[in-house]
Image: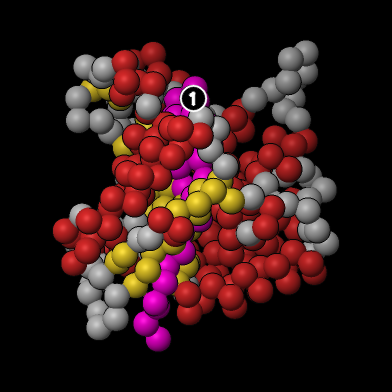
Amino acid sequence: MADKEYIIFCDESDVSGAYYSNFYGGVLVGSSHYDRITTRLNSEKQRLNLFGEVKWSKVTATYLPKYRELMQAFFEEVRQGHLKVRIMFRQNVHQAVGLTQDQIEGAFFRLYYQFIKHAFGLMHRTPIAEPARLRLYFDEFPETKEAASQFKGFILALKDNPRIHHAGLSIRTEDIAEFDSHDHVLAQCLDVVLGAMAFRLNNKHKEIPQGQRRRGKRTVAKEILYKAILAEIHRIRPGLNIGISTGTPDGLAERWTAPYLHWRFVPSEVEYREEFVKPKNKTGPTQPT
């Protein structure tokens, strides 16, 4: 069945991290699967007694088994191609140069725009008989209403991009909105995946509380959940390196069709900053993470 609508839930994390920053994530679902998947995941939450909002920040040793089961259900849908997940981030060793003050101050939304425009490969969707509507939902922005309104205007203008238009995708003003993740289980699952990537890439799994000799139980639980999520990802993309852009050996169309991809965003003009290299990777800027 051809989807008449596509819905993308978006989230962000770790604007400034020790080694990686500006994490953006999105999960795309077609209208033909949305109701069924939402019902399934909400039922899983009920079965697991997860009555509140699921978030990476809430992961504890007590809730670890429940989160693992929910993530298994989520990634089963990803593995079957019913959901598409994209994660974008910036590696701090690649520092942009030559930016104006406006570009620096507007970095949050400028990067978000790049994520929406390119991460899902919208322009690589194969045109079909019926065009499809694209709806985008963003977790409540931490920026001013004026800046958010301007950003939404730029997103709306993507409908006029010739390649996106040729792909049969349209966007309306009412299709771009902020939402409360408490009401959307797909956004909650995305938060967990995005949080896990930021956690591991910024070496938070090694953190030891001040005055202690060992890691806290919550940190250990989060590392276990991260490894469980990575195992699910590797069932889809064997050997995927979370710290670099995922390859698309089958061509650019895979940016649209692939169930799961990472994108390490690198500005066009950068300088290499050795002080931001993770300690174990001092041999060079492209060592695996």
Callout 1: few (<14), some (14-19), or many (20+) C-alpha neighbours within 10 Å? few
The single residue placed furthest to the bottom in the displayed view is 1
Which quadrant, please, contains the N terminus?
bottom left
Figure label count: 1
Return the x and y of residue 47 as percentages of the image width and height.
80, 69
Question: Residue visible at 77% across and 18% down?
Answer: 212
- Horizontally, residue 97 falls left or right of residue 104, namely left
Looking at this view, is 128 or 188 the one in front? 128
Assess whether residue 177 is covered by the magenta stretch.
Answer: no
Whether residue 3 is in magenta: the answer is: yes
Q: Nearer the viewer, residue 263 or 155?
A: 155
Q: Is residue 76 above or below residue 212?
A: below
In the picture, measured across the screen, residue 200 lies left or right of residue 103, that is right
**Image spot of residue 206 (x, y percent):** 61, 28
Q: Mark 1 highlights which residue? A: 16
| Residue occupying the point 29% across, 81% down | 130
What amino acid is found at the position of numbered circle 1 in the picture?
Ser
**SS at mark 1?**
loop
Range drawn in magenta: 1-25
The answer to whether residue 120 is left or right of residue 87 is left
